[in-house]
Amino acid sequence: MKILKMSAIAVAVTMSCVSTAQAADLTIATVNNGHMIEMQKLTGHFEKANPGINVNWVTLDEGTLRSRVTTDIATKGGQFDVMTIGMYEAPMWGAKGWLEALDFDASYDVDDILPAMRGGLSHGGNLYAAPFYGESSMIMYRKDLMDAAGMTMPDNPTWGHIEDAAAAMTDKDNGVYGICLRGKPGWGDNMAFITTLANSFGAQWFDMEKKPQLDSPAWNHAVNFYVDLLTNYGPPGSSGNSFNEILALTNAGKCGMWIDATIAASFVSDPSQSSVAEHMAFAQSPVAVTHRGANWLWAWALAVPAGTQQSAEAQAFVQWATSKEYIELVAATNGWASVPTGTRSSTYANKNFTDAAVFADAELKAILSADPSNSTQAPSPFKGVQFQAIPEFADIAGAVGQQLSAALAGDITVEEALAESQKAADRAMRKAKYYK
Amino acid sequence: MMLNISQRKTVKHWATGLFAWLVALILFFPILWMIMTSFKTELQAISQPPLLFWETTFDNYILIQERSDYLKYAFNSLYTSVGGTLLALIIAVPSAYAMAFFPGKYTKDILLWMLSTKMLPAVGVLIPIYMITQMGGLLDSIYPLILIFALMNLPIIMWMLFTYFKEIPKEILEAARMDGATTRDELRHIVMPLSWGGIASAGLLSLILCWNEAFWSIQLTASDAGTLAALIASYSSPEGLFWAKVSAASTMACAPIIVFGWFCQKQLVQGLTFGAVK
Amino acid sequence: MNSQSNISTQVQHKWLNVVNLLKAPSIILLLVWMIVPLSMTVYYSFVEYNLLYPGPKLFIGLENYSYFSTDSAFFPALFNTLVLVGSVLTITVVLGLALALLVNQPFFGRGVVRVLLISPFFIMPTVNALIWKNMMMDPNYGIFSVIADFFNVVPINFLEDLPLASIILMVSWQWTPFALLIFMTSLQSQDTEQKEAAQLDGAGFWSIFRFLTLPHLARPIAIVVMIQTIFHLSLFAEIFVTTGGGPGFASTNLAWLIYRQAFLAFDVGVASAGGVFAIILANIVAFFLIRAVGKNLTE
C-alpha cells in the first residue's frame, strides 16, 4: 500500500516535471455566454493546479464560432485544442472521428452526468463532448397576472390552456402581452422553439424515408396556431424577437408568459435585473396532441478535436471545467444561484443550490423528460428534439426559419411559408442524396 | 425690413454655419451615442427615456481589459494594417510610376482588370485561402493577414497613385533627363517630392480599410493574431443584453483609427483627387 | 547620325526593361492573387465537396450551378444586390455632393464640422451595424422609437418591416463621408475666377452648379461610383449582424446566399458555384459601368 502511494507520488511528481518542462499552450474556442465568461475568469485556478499549462481563449459570438470551428475541424486546421460545441455537433463529429473520445478518471464521476445530456453528447457509447451547461425549455409566467385573471397554471398545461391564459392576461393598453415567443429567424432561434411546438402538435421534420414533412397538416396546424397566438396576444415586432429581446421584455414586466430556455429562469427571477422577479413562476412546456418533444434539450459542451498536439492537457482542462469541483468553485466565488446547471444530478441534489434557485425543480423535470431519440409522435429517422442531427439541418432550418419569420410578420401566408420551406428542405435532402 | 448686402452676407454665413453644424451633429450622433453608452451601466444603457446625464462608469472598459488583453488586439491591428499598407505601397509605387510615365498599349486595361480582382466575394474563396494558409502552417499568424490586406488594397492604391502620378508634368522630368539625371535621381528628387501627397493619402486610405477589415482577420486567426475586429466579435452576445459592453469594445476598437483619421484629414484629402486637378 | 539613333534605341530598350520590371510585381502578384483562388473556386464548383462529408471530390458537372441558381432566393438575391448597390450609390453621391457644397462655404467651425462629417467612414462595418441595430433602430429601446414615442406615433420596426432599406441606410451613412471627402477635394480645385465671372453675369446657384461644378465633378463622381460598386457588390457584414438575410428573402443578397452555402450548409461546391455567379455579375456590372463612366476613369 505504502509502495503504491509512493510510486503514485513519484509518478505525479514526474508528470508535473514533464509538464513544467514542456509548457503547453492550450487554445480554447468558446461562445461569449455568461457561464463561459465566468469560466475564463476562473481559469487561473486551473493553471495554478496544472503548472506548465497556459490557457488562451478565443471568444466569439455563436454564429461566428460555429463557422470558425467547423472550418477548422473539417480542414484539419488544428487551431484549437478545446472547442465549445453544441449537442447538434457532438454526436455527428464524434461519428466522423473528428473528436477524441473523452476518458476521465473515476473522480470525475461520469455517471453523475444527467442521462439525457450524456446520451445526447455520445455516439456509439463514447462520450465525445462533456456538458458544461445544459438546458431544456419551460414556461416562465407571471403568477400575479395569472391570479388576477382568475386562472391557474397546471404543472403540465395544454396549448389550449395557454391560449386562454394569454387572452386573459393581455392588456395592450398597459403594455402587457399574454405571451412572448421567439420569432427571429435562425435554426437555433425561432426554429428551436417552433420545432418543439410542432412536435407536440404531432408534426415531424422527416418521416422514416427521410422525406421532409413540412407540408403536412400537423405542421400547418402548429404554425397557424403559433402565428395566431402571437398576432393576437404577443408583443409588436415578434418576428425580430429571440432570447435576448424577450428577456428584456419579460424583465420589464411586459410578458405574461414566456416559453424558452430554462437558463432564462435564473435571469427573470433575479431581482437585480428583473422588475418582476418575485412574481415569476414556472411550469412544464405546453403540449397539444403529444408530450413527446414538447420541450427541447440542449447543452454547450467542451470537446477535444482529434489530432491535437496537447491531447492530455486538453482533456485535463475539459475534465476540470465540467467537474463537480468546478461547480463548487463557481458557487464559492459567485454563489449557488450562478453555477452552471443542467449537467449533473449532484447539482440538483445539493440543498444549497435548490434553496438558491427557485427554478431548480422545474428545470430538472424538463431536462429529464426530454428524449432526443424519441421526440415525435410518429417515429423519426434522426436524433434530436429541436433539431435533427444531420449536417444539412442547420441550412434547412435556417431557410425554414426565414419563411416562418416572414409569415409571422404577415409578409406571406403560413401556407406559402410552409410550401416554400418544404421545397427548400426537399432540395437540400435530395442534394445530400438521402433519397432520389 | 431690408438688409444691405453685407448684412445679408452675414445672415447667410450664419445660416449656412448653423445648418452645417446641425447636419454634422446628426450624422455624428450614432458615434457619439455609442461613446456615451460605453460609459453607462447595462441598465442605464437601455433605460427609457434614454439618459442624457448620468453618473459615468468606467466599469465596461475595466471589464474588457480584464477579460481580453486590449493591447494585444490593438497591436495586431496596428501591425497588420501598417504591414499590409507598406507592402502594398512598396509594390504599387514603382508600378504606378512606370504605368503613368511609360504607359503601354494595355495599361488602362490592366488597371481596370486590377480593380475587377476586388470583386471576388471573400466568402466564396475562404476555403481555398484557409487551406493554403494551413498548408503553409500560417494560421493564426499576422503574416498571411499582412499579405492579404496588401493584395486587397493594391488595386485601389495602384489606381490612386497612377492618377496622381499622371498629373506630374512630364516636362519637368524631360528637363531633368536632359540634364543627365538618372532614373534614381529622377525618382528621388523630382517624382517623390511631387508625389508625397498621393502616396500619403493612398497609404492612409489603405490603413483605414485594413483596420476595419473583419472577415479575414476573424477567420484566419485564433488566440495569437486576433485583431480588434475579433475583439468586437467576442462581445456581441446572444445571451443577455450587453449594449454598454459592446459599445465600450467598439469604442476601443474604433477610437485609434478615428483619432488618427482626424489628425491626418488634410493628408488623406490631398491625394484623393484621382487626377481631377486640371 | 546612324550610331546616334542606335544609341537612343538602346537607351529606349533599356528603359523599357526597367519600366516592365517596375510594373511586373503588382501585375504578377495580383494575377496570382486572382488566379489561385479563382481557379480553386472554379475547380470546386464542378466537384462534389461538402466540408462535413470528407471523401473523394467527384466531378459532377454543372450540378452545383443548377442547385445554386434554382434556390428560391437566387433571383431575389440578384435583385437585392443590384438594389443595394444602386440605392447606396445614389444616396451617397447626392448627399456627398450636397454636403461637399455645404462645407465648401465659409462658416464658423468648418474644420470641426468636416471632422464630424467624415467620422462614420472610419467605423468598422460590424460596429456600424451594431450601433444602428441596437441603439438606433431597436423597436423598444432605440433612438428612433424614442423619437416616435415623442411624437406619439407607432415606432417603425426597421429591421423587420424595412430590412433592405435599413441596410441601405447603414451603408450610406458609412460611405457618404467617402464621397464627401473626394468631392470636397475636387471642389477646392475648382476655378473660383470662372465661378465669380459667372456670378457677375447673373448666373444663379443652380446654373453654376449645373454648368460649372457638375462637369468639374464628373470624374470624381465616376471614381466614387466605381470604388463603391466594388465594395457594395459583396456587402456582407451589415447583413450578418442585423437581418440575417430576412425576413424571408427581403434582405438576402448574393454574398449572403454564398455565405449560407459556405457556412450553414458547409457545401464548398455550391458556395464556389455561387462565387462564380458573383464574379459574372460583377463583370456584367463592371462592363456597363466602364461604358457609362469609364471614359472619366482613365483619360
Image (cartoon, helix red, strand yellow):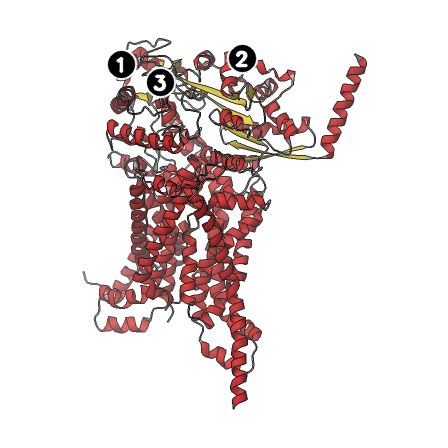
Task: Tell me whether marks 2 and 1 sit on the same chain.
Answer: yes
Chain on which label 3 sits: A
Earlier sequence position, callout 3 versus callout 1: 1
Earlier sequence position, callout 2 versus callout 1: 1
Name the residue tied to disc 2: A345
Earlier sequence position, callout 2 versus callout 3: 3
Name the residue tied to disc 3: A199
Q: Is residue B136 above or below residue C220?
A: above
Q: Residue at x 27, y 68 (%)?
A: C212
Dot 3 falls on a residue whose secondary structure is helix
Dot 1 falls on a residue whose secondary structure is helix
Name the residue tied to disc 1: A164
Between marks 2 and 3 in the image, the one whose residue lies nearer the viewer: 3
Chain on which label 2 sits: A
Locate residue A327 relative to residue A428 in the image: left or right: right
Between marks 2 and 1 in the image, the one whose residue lies nearer the viewer: 2
